[in-house]
Structures are given as structure tokens and as C-alpha cells.
Amino acid sequence: MKRRPVFLITMLCFGFAFFYIPILSMIVYSFNGSRLVTVWGGFSTKWYASLFSNRQVLNAAVLSIEIALLSATFATILGTMAGVALARFKRFRGRTLFSGLVTAPLVMPEVITGIASLMLFILMAEYIGWPATRGFTTVTLAHITFCMVFVTTIVHSRLVEADEAIEEAAMDLGSRPWQVMKDITLPVISPAILSGWLLAFTISLDDVVITNFTTGPGTTTLPILIWSKVKLGVTPDINALATITVVIVGLGVFVAGVILNRAEKRRERDMHMAYQANQ
Amino acid sequence: MTRAAFFPRLRHWFNRRGWIKITIATPYVWLALFFLLPFAIVIAMSFATRTPTAPPFSFGGEHPLMNTAHFARLFSDDLYIRAYLNSIGNATVATLLCLLIGYPMALGLTRVSRSWRNVLLMLVILPFWTSFLLRVYAWMGLMGTNSWFNKLLTEAYNFVMPADMALRYIPMMNTGFAVVLVTVYSYLPFMILPLYANLEKLDLSLNEAAMDLGSRPFQVFRDVTLPLSVPGIIAGSLLVFIPASGELIIPSLVGSSSRPMIGRVISDEFASARDWPMASAVAVALLLLLVGPLMAYSYYEGKSHEKPTAGGGN
């Protein structure tokens, strides 16, 4: 007996309407000709023009991207190491504390992480003199720290799912553990490492609260700039900025999804062919 | 040992044991330095005394090392108690609403065809990848007194209600309602994804067996699906409740300034009042309130770190 789950489908429709109506409304109003953000004054792209001629916005965007590239890369290296350590080294001293340390930042209220990091940086500047001022360095250090645990989560769950039999086979054939890690494990989890990097990049690019605490004068990232503008109310050029962000992110997620999907399929096909060849 | 033999020996060490030690130690030391140490500082700071120096604290004075005055103030000052009650109440209501909306959505996702499922999952994740700030901002546009959304709601309200209770617009911005609404909107994917991960793994033949034995669909849900999805419910609820209770952006953009929220209190004590010890004490008290939920979360996460089949999931 197969029945259409009418109630569930209805809830899905309502849920997606709830998700997307605010975003669609924002996109539509970014083409509003009127200065008043709530009254429709005809189609216009002038807010995009004013956005692209705004040096402040462009500088903030470039700074945000620089910080995000740097912190995503370091977060991926550190996060992958932590994921490998948790998934493959079953016992080492302090393992319990370590697994607590990689889960706590995921759910910690950002305000607490923010003031905690800020106090650390102020005390570091006071007592060891580095980093001397707050700005690019401190923001990047804080971003690496809270982005790396997201990479760890992704890499770890991929490693737990991955078949350890191949690694064991390589060991039986005389490979050293390091060779196995380098030649088998890391290539197998490379899609997970890539999606970890992407997640770290977007989280860093998006962060307001922790950046707000750890940044200093002269280092204004894009979210901090938007935050200070939005506090004063709704403005049409932020609608334009939001639309650009949504389009870029949407395309990015779509392209990454397609690439990852293809890589996964190719890997599966290669493994299948290798298996067939050995029969 | 000659100098020439040093690098081969280093490489030998790296290949045998060294790489394992480096893999564990590097992230460990990093997290200890930039995550654990800051927390130790916050806890120590909550027992310090405020001074007008820079940095503005000292551990000397009348109560060396253990100044508990700030914790006493938490209970005597009405502001802090109201802030905790508002924040926890807000996070609780938002979590329940996320569960009420997110559960049927997650269950619905497991019931649609495979190709639809991938598209819909992508659509759940997509808002999560766009800027958090801009998602809050989108609602600011919708809730304003002159927006099409507010006008639509006002029309609907005036249509239903008697004429003498008619409104010109519905006041939504800067209310507790706005904070709950935007919190639900922002955190809903965090509820749906762990629930979906949990529900997807359930064996549908159990449902069929229950149906064959004469259960009605709702009974099957109540007696089979719901009990089996408890780990997903717990993981999703914690992922919403814990960050929502310390939320700073949403209350300061759409909330009312007369309803203090704990995230803002911490931030204001720190930045405006420059009272580090008090800000730390408020933060420590919030952590103590959250310690139960946090432990529960790491317990479930820890279990999933041990074996892949355990609940939770991200």
C-alpha cells in the first residue's frame, strides 16, 4: 500500500516558501528605482552602479576574500590533520580532551568565543608583544581556529565511512603507514578536503561576531561594513550587494556540486574497472 | 652523530613515528593555544577585579585571586536575570518551532524520489551558504511597516478581525516576535540536516511491518519513526538551542532594546563598559547554563566519533 504523504509534501512546500520568499523579495527590491526601500519605483540597476563605484565596499570585499583564502587554507591543513588523528589513531594520550576540543567550537556561542579570543590577543600584545596590533593577523588567527573544526568534522566523517580494507591490504603488501596515508588515504578523502576548504572559506567570509571582537581600526571586512550599515536601517545598495552574494554563492555551490559529483562518479568507475580487471 | 647523517635520520623518524606525532600535535597545540587558553582566561578573568588601568583588571586588591563579587551581582541585578530569562526563553521557543517545522520537512525529504531529494537538499543547504547577516537583513525588509509583506498580513488581519480592532500595520520590527521568527529562519537548516541524516537511515520495512499488522499511519509514526529518530531530534535541537541562546546579531538588528539578551549584555559590558571581569562572569554563567546541553552534544558527537552508526551526524 503506497500513499502519497500529502501532509509532508505540503510542509516541504511551506518550508521552502519560508526559506526563499525573503531572499526573492530582497533580489526584486535590489532593482527598485525608488530610494524608499519599501515602495516600488520602477526597474533600475542604479544601486548596482553605486555599489561598484563605492571604494569602501570594494576594499572591504577584497580584504574579506584575502582573509578567507588564508584562513581556509590553514584551517584545511590543521582540520585535516585533526580529522586523520581522530579517525585513524585509535589511542593516544589526551584523546578525549582532543575530541572535545574539536566539537566544542562548533556549537559554542560566538560571543563567548569572540571575547575569549579578544582577551587572549590583548594579553598576548601586552606580555609577548605579538601580534602587536589587532587587525589582519588576529582576525585570521581567530578564523583559522573556528573554521578548522568544520573541516575536521567533514574529513572525519569521510574517513570513518571510507573502507579501511584497502589501507589494510596495502599494509599487508608491505607499505609503511606513512606511504599508505600519502598514497591511498589522502587521495581517497580529497573530495572531503575540498568541500572542507569551501565550507571554511564561506564561513570565514561570512563571519561577523568573532571578527567584530578580534578586528582593529582600519581592518573592516565586508560583513563588518554591512553590519555597521544595516544597524542604521534598510538601504537599497545592501539589497544589490545581497543579490550579488546570493548569485555568486548559488553558482559556486552548483559548480562545486557538479564537480564533486563527477569526481565521485569517476572514482567509483575507476575502482569498478580496476576490480573487473583483477577478476 | 655527524651532520650529514642528520637529515636521513630525520626522514627515518618522520616515516616511522614522526608523522603520527606531528599529525596529532599540530592541531592539538593550535586548539589548546587559541581555543582552550582563551577559555581559561575568561574563567580566571571572572574572578578578577576591575581597575582603571590598561588592560583593565587586576588580581590583587581586597580579594586576591578570588573576587566573587561579579557572580553575586548576576543575582542581585535585575538586568542580568531578565537577560538570561529572555535569551533562554527565546532559544527554547525557537528550538521548538524549528523542530515543528523541520521534522515534517526532514521526513518529507526522505519520502520524495532520489533525484528530487538531491535538489531539495541543495535548496536546504543553499541559504546556509549565503551570508547569515544578509538573511537577517532580508527579514528587516519584509517586516518593516510599509513592506508588501506587512501590508499583506495587515489586510489578512483586518479581514478576519472586527472593524473596530483594525490596524494600519502590524508592528513586527523590534519585538520579541521578530527575534524568534528570524532565529527560526536562520537556524532551521541546522535542525533539518541532522534530522534528515537520522531519518534517512531508518529501515522502511519496519513501517511496512507495522502497517501490515494493522497500525494506522499516525500510529506508525508515533510508535516506530518518532522513537527511532530521538538521536536526530537531540542533535538538531542542541545545534539550534546552544548558538541561539548566545545570539548577538539577531537581537541587535530586529530585537527591542528594552528586552535585554545575554549576547548583547556580554558584548556591551566588554566593549562599552570596559568591565572585563563582569563580561567574563556573565559569559561563564551562560556557559554553566549551557554545560548540560554542551556535554550532551559532545557525548552524542563523541559516540559518532567512535562508530559511524551512532546518532548525531552533521
Image (cartoon, coloured by chain):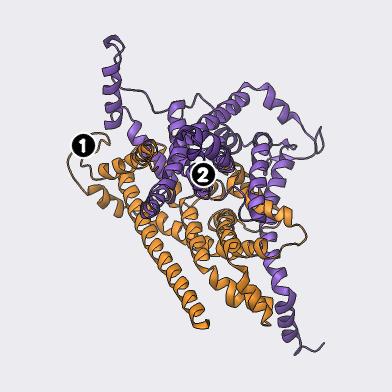
Q: Is residue B215 visible?
A: yes
Percent coordinates x, y for residue B245 in the rendering: 56, 35
Q: How busy is the neighbourhood of tag 1: few (under 14 within 10 Å), some, or many (20 plus)?
A: some
Percent coordinates x, y for residue B294 in the rendering: 65, 41
Q: On residue B102, which mark appears?
A: none
Which residue lies under the disc numbered 1? A40
Q: Quadrant of residue A247?
A: bottom left
Q: Amino acid at mark 2?
A: Leu
Q: How busy is the neighbourhood of tag 2: few (under 14 within 10 Å), some, or many (20 plus)?
A: many
Residue drawn at x 51%, y 43% is B209
Q: Residue furthest front?
A: B213
Q: Chain of mark 2?
A: B
Percent coordinates x, y for residue A111 in the rendering: 58, 41
| The chain coloured orange in the image | A
Percent coordinates x, y for residue A256 in the rendering: 40, 62
Q: Amino acid at mark 1?
A: Trp
SS at mark 2 in the image? helix
Q: Is residue B282 above or below residue A219?
A: above
Q: Is residue B287 visible?
A: no
Q: Nearer the viewer, residue B132 or A235?
A: B132
Quarter holding the N terminus of chain B is: bottom right
Q: Is residue A71 above or below residue B70?
A: below
Which residue lies under the disc numbered 2? B195
Q: Is residue A158 left or right of residue A66?
A: right
Q: Is residue A59 above or below residue B214?
A: below
SS at mark 1 in the image? loop
Q: CA distance from mark 2 to mark 1?
A: 40 Å
* Rendered colour, chain B: purple
Residue drawn at x 67%, y 77% is A171
